[in-house]
Structure formats: C-alpha cells, structure tokens
C-alpha cells in the first residue's frame, strides 16, 4: 500500500514491445491487490514490426501483425490516449484521451516504454512526400499505393507519368528498408503478370544508403552478399549516397542521380520519442533516458525504462549501450518487471545482461540472410529461419496460429494484388513522418 492507504499504481507509458511484455510479466508476478498496472498508448494494440513487410506484401493479414492490449492484458487498465507530460517529482502524468480534455493521472511507479520515432531530416520535400514504415497503417498504405501505381501506369501514355509510377525509392539500408524493399519488389513484379502494358523490365527499384554497407546487424560479409543479390534482381543499390531532395516527387541524390517517383519510403534511422523531453527525468546527449544496468532511471526513485528510448549499459559489450532491437526490448521488459516486484517487496533488483544470438532478415519470398552465433546462412534456409523465429516470438497463441494459417493460404493460392483505392489516401495520411499525405500527380 502507498502512504495514503491505496493500492499503488504502476504506470507504463507505451504499449509496444516493452510495455506489453512488462505488463504481461507483472500480471504473472504480482499478487492480487498488490498493485494496479496501467498502460497508456495512442493505439489499443501492439504492432509486431518484423511482420510489417509481409503484411505489406500480402503474405500476412494486417490484423494478424498486431496484438490487442485489452485482450492480452485482461488484468491491466488500458488507456487509449497520449501522455504529453510527466512530472515525476509529483508522480503525475498528463494524459490526452482520444477525445476530451487532458487530465492528470497520479501514479507511484513509472515505466517509460515509449520507444523511438522516425528520424526525419530537414530534406526538402521529405516530410510532405515520403512515407514511413513504422506501423501497420503505413505498411498497408504502401501496398495499396504501389499497386495503384501499377494501375495508373498500365493506362498511362505520358512517359513522365509512367516514370513516376514505376520508380520506387527506398531510403535506408537497415532491416526496415531492406525488408520493405525486398517484399515490395516481389509483390510488384508478381503483379505485372496480370498487366498488358507494364513488364518487370519497366520497373525501377532504388535503395539509397548513406553509409558504405547495408544490414550491419548480419555482418559485413553477409551485407556485401545481400547487395549482390539485390543487384542481381535488378535493384539499384546506391551506397554512400544521400537523399538531397524529393520535392513533388523530383528525387535528387547526392551522387547526381535524378528521377521522378511517386513512391519514396523513408526508413533511415530513428530517434528517442520526443515525449522524453517533456519529463523531469535525466536524458543523455542523444535524448535517451539514462538508465542503469538494473533498468532503473539513474538517480531517480520509482522510475524505470527499457527499449529503444533508453541508454542502458551493455554488460555483454563493455563500453557500449544496448542496441535498439526487439531482442533487447523483450528481454529487458521481463527483467524490468521482475525488478519492480523485487523492489516493492524489499529485495535487490537484478542486472540486465544479454548477448545477441544473431540476426535474421527476409529478402522476399524464399530468400533471406542470417548470422546466428557466428554462422552465416543465406537463401531459403535463412528465410525459413526468419519465419520460424518470428512466428515463435509473436505474442499469443492465437496470433501464432493466424500467422501460420496466412502463410499456408499464401503458399496454396495466388497472391492477392488488389489495391483498395478508397482507403489509400486515408491510410497514407497516417504516416509517422507527417500528418499530410503526399500529393498525387495525374495525367
């Protein structure tokens, strides 16, 4: 009990990996009446982001990439809204509901699990024209958009309109960019078999990466192999190249290349959630929440953090911080929940330590790349490993069964290449890069 005699509230800000798994673990560890767990997030579900590329390609139903918070956390209090300010000195968070006036929510223990947001650079036209690839709305918007582009190009006679609609630019050579590009390329090339005036040779896919390598998580050798594989598929991989402008779809690259494209996908990095700046908690020079190896906020009582928004020393790699990955987020969440319960009961918290087992990435249907415990895997075995691993990690049995069923249907039947025209503009406007969707050029 708190000093006022009420049941203490554990407030979890964010319903992503860390938020969901922390709440799940607390539900297992806490005794009835020991604490109230409250989760606040603008969405009523957690998005399993590794499945977004396959959702965009149509291999998985969009609803099967998300995990509903209320169904998964029946013992927790779920508030669908945003936290706009945290005053930990007062133990109060200001919550903005989906509708209605903001209000103050008191708490006793705070868990910051807000994650990261796309890092949008001041590139002319970027915020107005590009689309992100951070949530399920954006994945489906991209699918509808690229299929709509094919419909437009099929009947267009103007060369400029055809170039705009048959050129697809992806910026960022990390997991999100490479997997989104590979799955989209698979989908679009497949869809051309149903067209008369658009062939696979008419398509142009461009991957832009500012550094000299892609997929650094799988190692330098496998990154080079992936570049070779993408180029063999006809994809232009432009390394050490930056996007300089994309005003009205006029794409300009730092290597001098220019092209017209109605499809610019931005996946070039993330930054800590800006909510952290509206708190009285300590941040580092990159805006991350400063946490110790026990996941407590340094120098602050009753405040904890984990995941992409935090700077947690990596005990498995002295001198470094834990990387922003799902592997760390899920494991940190469980340790964090155990530590909260331990401290509430008068015990010492444990230290978080985890060594990466490896990384896997999909390069489209039946193609992949992986590095697991130093072993390099490529092609179909890596793709199969990618699917198996993520199927095992997606929360809840129902979602696991649903995903396997989707894969089975996709294997037995032809791809669905229908563009839902009526929902395209609405979905595109929900991009994490901007609240204003890009304009469409017409004939």
Image (cartoon, helix red, strand yellow):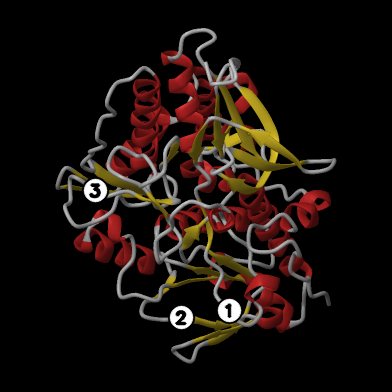
The residue pinned by badge 1 equals 122
Answer with left or right where residue 156 lies relative to residue 254.
Answer: right
Which disc is residue 242 wearing? 2
What is the distance, in whole Å, between disc 2 and disc 1 at their CAs? 12 Å
Please tell me which of labels 2 and 3 falls first in the chain.
2
Residue underneath mark 3: 314
**Is 336 drawn above or below residue 152 in the view shown?**
above
Residue lying at the far front in this picture: please name it.
3
Q: Nearer the viewer, mark 2 or mark 3?
A: 3
List x then y, in percent, for residue 153.
72, 69
* Number of residues whose C-alpha sits closer than 10 Å to that of mark 1, classed few (under 14), some (14–19) or many (20 or more): few
Q: Quadrant of residue 227?
A: bottom left
Nearer the observer, disc 2 or disc 1? 1
97 and 104: which is toward the camera: 104
Q: Is residue 238 left or right of residue 261?
A: left
Local SS, label 2: loop
Query: Is residue 373 shown above or below 244?
Result: above
Q: Nearer the viewer, mark 3 or mark 1?
A: 3
Q: Nearer the viewer, residue 249 or 430?
A: 430
Q: Residue at x 33, y 62 (%)?
A: 229
**Are discs 2 and 1 less than 8 Å apart at CB?**
no
Residue 99 at x, y = what percent?
83, 41
Residue at horizontal 50%, vertical 55%?
180
Callout 3 crowding tier (Cα within 10 Å): few <14, some 14–19, many ≥20: some
Task: Measure the alpha-carbon separation of dots 3 and 1.
Answer: 32 Å
Sequence-wise, the earlier of marks 3 and 1 is 1
Residue 75, located in which quarter of the rendered image? top right
Provide the secondary structure element on which disc 3 rests. loop
33 and 414: which one is in front? 33
Q: Is residue 389 visible?
A: no
């Amino acid at each position: 009990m708190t000093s006022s005699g009420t049941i203490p509230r554990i407030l979890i800000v964010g319903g992503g990996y860390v938020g969901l798994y922390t709440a799940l673990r607390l539900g297992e560890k806490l005794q009835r009446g020991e604490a109230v767990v409250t989760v606040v997030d603008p969405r009523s579900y957690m998005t399993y982001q590794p499945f977004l590329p396959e959702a965009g390609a149509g291999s998985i139903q969009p609803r099967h990439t998300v995990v509903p918070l209320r169904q998964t956390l029946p013992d927790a209090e779920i508030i669908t809204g945003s936290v706009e300010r945290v005053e930990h000195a007062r133990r109060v968070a200001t919550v903005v509901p989906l509708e209605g006036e903001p209000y103050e929510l008191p708490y006793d223990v705070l868990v910051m699990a807000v994650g990261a947001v796309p890092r949008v650079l001041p590139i002319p036209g970027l915020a107005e024209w590009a689309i992100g690839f951070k949530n399920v709305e954006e994945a489906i918007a991209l699918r509808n958009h690229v299929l709509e582009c094919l419909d437009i190009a099929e009947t267009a006679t103007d060369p400029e309109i055809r170039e705009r609609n048959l050129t697809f630019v992806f910026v960022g050579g990390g997991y999100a960019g490479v997997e989104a590009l590979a799955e989209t390329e698979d989908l679009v090339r497949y869809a051309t078999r149903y067209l008369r005036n658009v062939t696979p040779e008419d398509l142009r896919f461009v991957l832009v990466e500012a550094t000299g390598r892609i997929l650094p998580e799988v190692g330098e050798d496998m990154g080079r192999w992936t570049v070779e594989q993408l180029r063999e598929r006809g994809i232009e991989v432009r390394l050490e190249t930056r996007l300089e402008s994309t005003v009205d779809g006029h794409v300009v690259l730092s290597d001098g290349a220019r092209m017209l494209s109605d499809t610019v996908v931005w996946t070039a990095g993330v930054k800590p959630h800006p909510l952290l700046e509206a708190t009285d908690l300590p941040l580092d020079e990159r805006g991350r929440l400063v946490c110790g190896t026990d996941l407590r906020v340094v120098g602050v009582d009753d405040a904890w953090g984990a995941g992409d928004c935090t700077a947690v020393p990596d005990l498995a790699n002295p001198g470094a911080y834990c990387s922003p990955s799902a592997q760390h987020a899920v494991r940190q969440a469980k340790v964090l929940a155990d530590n909260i319960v331990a401290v509430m009961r008068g015990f010492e918290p444990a230290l978080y330590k985890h060594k990466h087992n490896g990384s896997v990435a999909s390069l489209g249907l039946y193609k992949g790349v992986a590095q697991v415990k130093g072993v390099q895997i490529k092609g179909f075995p890596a793709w199969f490993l990618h699917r198996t691993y993520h199927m095992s990690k997606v929360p809840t049995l129902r979602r696991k069964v649903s995903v396997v069923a989707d894969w089975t249907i996709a294997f037995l039947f032809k791809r669905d290449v229908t563009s839902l025209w009526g929902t395209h503009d609405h979905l595109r406007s929900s991009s994490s890069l901007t609240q204003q969707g890009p304009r469409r050029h017409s004939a």
